[in-house]
Structure formats: structure tokens, C-alpha cells
């Protein structure tokens, strides 16, 4: 089946044409990263407006790169949620319009399930059942994927997602946005030394996550290091505490804090992910989402998994961040099972 998929859940406008759920014919992504950088995070209204500006051109480019006409498309998949409601509506409205005009079936796709299916675009040998860890800016979740139609949530964050914590700590340290790649670069090769931050909910049978306390511990550490306090008159819980003029002179302290923070996040993800794989006797642990691009996480997960006889499977870096190819892969599985949606379905900010 030739599927056109659309992804607009956050700040990437993406479209992709995929054949039979595995062969990517085109994968177009327009990022808004530079637009949101000055704000230190995604501004929902601005993101929605940029999706409106880009969506037609992105879909058209996906068709051109795939060398197919709209009339050859057999079905459409689109991210229904979870995500920013205004952003989701842009993609859904576009998908509905095309499905109506072309008289073809369509289906709304769960964004996190799409991340799980991203691995099948590179590793079609991964068979069901398996355990999946989705780690992104908005979610940190564990799934028991019994079959394409039976995906059970078995663990999730109770507060901040891992990617969100990376962004907020990077902002706190005055390092910029997005936080994940910046902290990874700053922490590279650094021994955090005596700096150690807490790991929450590490009890043996607990598969949930919590990064709010870790984030607060970093805040208190930075306040002590630089003798500054969080300003109560500033909107939002986190703003830069390290003055730009001190960034260079305090480089070593900042790098140690960044390394200790990253170590805490990585250890938590590795322990919980492998614990889940052991619980469900899964030979493979799929690790996906934007944070799955982190090289330290990939290395540590691979090392620890080898000791337990578990194979960690990561999508290629380009398929870790939000993209439409993964939406097409998930949509293909749903469509093959006869799961379609009529034109009345809406966006879900939470799902």
C-alpha cells in the first residue's frame, strides 16, 4: 500500500510517502527550531502559524521526491495526538481535505505508537512482541507491544519528560535550546566528580519515571554555585541563572553539572528500560524518540543490555526525532487491519 503521512504534533512540519510500511520513498521535515530558539522552547501559537505556512509545500515536496502523483496515493495517515492541539489541527485538516478529494481511506495515528514503529523502517526483522521505551521532549513512556494492534502502556513519567528536563536544565545553565544536543556536547568526556543528582522512583517493581526532583536538584546546585536565586517575578519555573558574562569562567562547573545531570537521566532510562524488558521476557528493547539520539544513552544501554542478553534496538538518528515516515509505518499497520477513521475525528492533545 502506498501511504502518504503527515506529522504536525509539535514544531516539525513533516510529510512522507512510504510503500508497504517499510520502504521510504520520501521523507520531508521542516523544522522550526531556529524560530523557537530565542524563546528557549516551543511557543504553541507560533508553531501552529508556521505549520499553516509550510504544510502545503511540505506535502507537495514529499510527493515530488517520491515521484508519485496524488492520484497514486492509496491511503493517508496523520498524527491525531498527543501533541499541541493547534499544531495537530493543521495536519488533520490537511489530511482530511486530501482524503476527501482523492476518495481514499485515512486514519489518525497515536504519536507515541508511531515512534515505536519507526524502528521497523530500518529493522523489519524486529518481531512482536517486544518492549519499547519512548523518550522525547513531551513523553517518557514504556510500552509492551504485544502485536500491531495491542500496545499497552506499562510505565510513564509522573511529571516532566526526559527531553523537557534536558531543555529546562540547558536553559537554567544559560546554554541555549534545544537542550538535549547542547548538554550532550558540553558533558562529553567530563567526569562529574563529586556531583551526583538523585534518581527518582528506582524501587525494584516501579516502571514509572519522575524528573521534576532531578530538575529541582540541579536548580539548587546552580543557585549555590553562582550565589543567585530564582526570581519569583519571572514567568515560568526556569530561566537562565548563569549570567552570560560568567559562562566562560564557570565553564568547568557548568560542564560538571551538565554531565552529572545527563548521567542521572541516562541511568534512570537504562535501569527502567531493561527492567521492563526483563519483566516481560522480551529479547529486544526498542528505544526511540528524540532523546534516543543521545550517544551516551545508546552506549550505556548497549553495554548494560549485553550483560542481560537483551538487544537494544534504536532507529537511525534521523528517525528518532519527529518525522512522518514513522506515522506512515504505523498507519500502514492499522490500515492493513481495516482500522480507518471517518472525517469526523478530532485532534487529541492527550491520548
Image (spheres, rainbow, N blue to C red):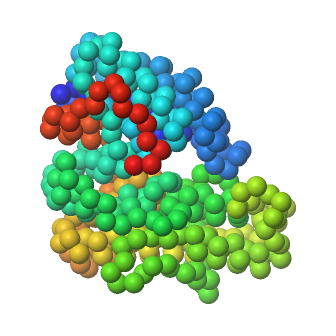
252 over 66 or under it: above or below: below
Visible residue check, residue 273 = yes
Q: Looking at the image, which is closer to me, 139 or 122? A: 139
Q: Looking at the image, which is closer to me, 208 or 6? A: 208
Image coordinates of residue 244 in percent, x first then y, are 81, 59
331 over 2 or under it: above or below: below
Residue sitting at the far bottom: 194
231 over 194 or under it: above or below: above
Image coordinates of residue 5 in percent, x first then y, are 34, 30
Image coordinates of residue 52 in percent, x first then y, are 55, 25
Q: Is residue 58 left or right of residue 145?
A: right
Q: Looking at the image, which is closer to me, 213 or 24? A: 213
Residue at figure coordinates x 45%, y 48% from the top left: 350
Count of marks overlaid on the render: 0
- Quadrant placement of the N terminus: top left
Residue at figure coordinates x 44%, y 29% from the top left: 91
Quarter of the image for residue 283 reads bottom left
Residue at figure coordinates x 70%, y 62% from the top left: 237
Visible residue check, residue 34 = no
Q: Is residue 276 left or right of residue 254?
A: left
Quarter of the image for residue 104 reads top left
Residue at figure coordinates x 77%, y 75% from the top left: 223
328 over 280 or under it: above or below: above
Image coordinates of residue 299 in percent, x first then y, are 38, 68
Quarter of the image for residue 165 reads bottom right
Amino acid at each position: 500500500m502506498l501511504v502518504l503521512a503527515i506529522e504536525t504534533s509539535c514544531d516539525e512540519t513533516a510529510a512522507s510517502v512510504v510503500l508497504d510500511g517499510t520502504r521510504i520513498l520520501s521523507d520531508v521535515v521542516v523544522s522550526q527550531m531556529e524560530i523557537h530558539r530565542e524563546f528557549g522552547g516551543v511557543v504553541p501559537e507560533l508553531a501552529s502559524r508556521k505549520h499553516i505556512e509550510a504544510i502545503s509545500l511540505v506535502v507537495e515536496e514529499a510527493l515530488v521526491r517520491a515521484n508519485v502523483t496524488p492520484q497514486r496515493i492509496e491511503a493517508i495517515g496523520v498524527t491525531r495526538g498527543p501533541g499541541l492541539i493547534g499544531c495537530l489541527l493543521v495536519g488533520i485538516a490537511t489530511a482530511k481535505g486530501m482524503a476527501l478529494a482523492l476518495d481514499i481511506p485515512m486514519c489518525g495515528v497515536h504519536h507515541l505508537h508511531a515512534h515505536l514503529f519507526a524502528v521497523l523502517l530500518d529493522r523489519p526483522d524486529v518481531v512482536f512482541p517486544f518492549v519499547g521505551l519512548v523518550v522525547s521532549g513531551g513523553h517518557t513512556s514504556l510500552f509492551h507491544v504485544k502485536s500491531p494492534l495491542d500496545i499497552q502502556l506499562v510505565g510513564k513519567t509522573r511529571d516532566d519528560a526526559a527531553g523537557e528536563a534536558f531543555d529546562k536544565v540547558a536553559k537554567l545553565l544559560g546554554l541555549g535550546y534545544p537542550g538535549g544536543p547542547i548538554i550532550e556536547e558540553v558533558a562529553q568526556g567530563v567526569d562529574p566528580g563529586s556531583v551526583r543528582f538523585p534518581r527518582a522512583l528506582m524501587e525494584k517493581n516501579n516502571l514509572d519515571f519522575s524528573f521534576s526532583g532531578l530538575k529541582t536538584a540541579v536548580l539548587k546546585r546552580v543557585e549555590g554555585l553562582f550565589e543567585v536565586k530564582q526570581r519569583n517575578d519571572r514567568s515560568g519555573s526556569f530561566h537562565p541563572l548563569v549570567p552570560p558574562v560568567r559562562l566562560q569562567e564557570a565553564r568547568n562547573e557548568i560542564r560538571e553539572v551538565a554531565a552529572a545531570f545527563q548521567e542521572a537521566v541516562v541511568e534512570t532510562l537504562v535501569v527502567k528500560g531493561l527492567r521492563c524488558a526483563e519483566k516481560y521476557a522480551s529479547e529486544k528493547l526498542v528505544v526511540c524518540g528524540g532523546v534516543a539520539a543521545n550517544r551516551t544513552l545508546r552506549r550505556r544501554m548497549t553495554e548494560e543490555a549485553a550483560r542481560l542478553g537483551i538487544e537494544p534496538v534504536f532507529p537511525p538518528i534521523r528517525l528518532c526525532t519527529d518525522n512522518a515516515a514513522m506515522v506512515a509505518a504505523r498507519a500502514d499497520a492499522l490500515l492493513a487491519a481495516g482500522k480507518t477513521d471517518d472525517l469526523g475525528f478530532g485532534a487529541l492533545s492527550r491520548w
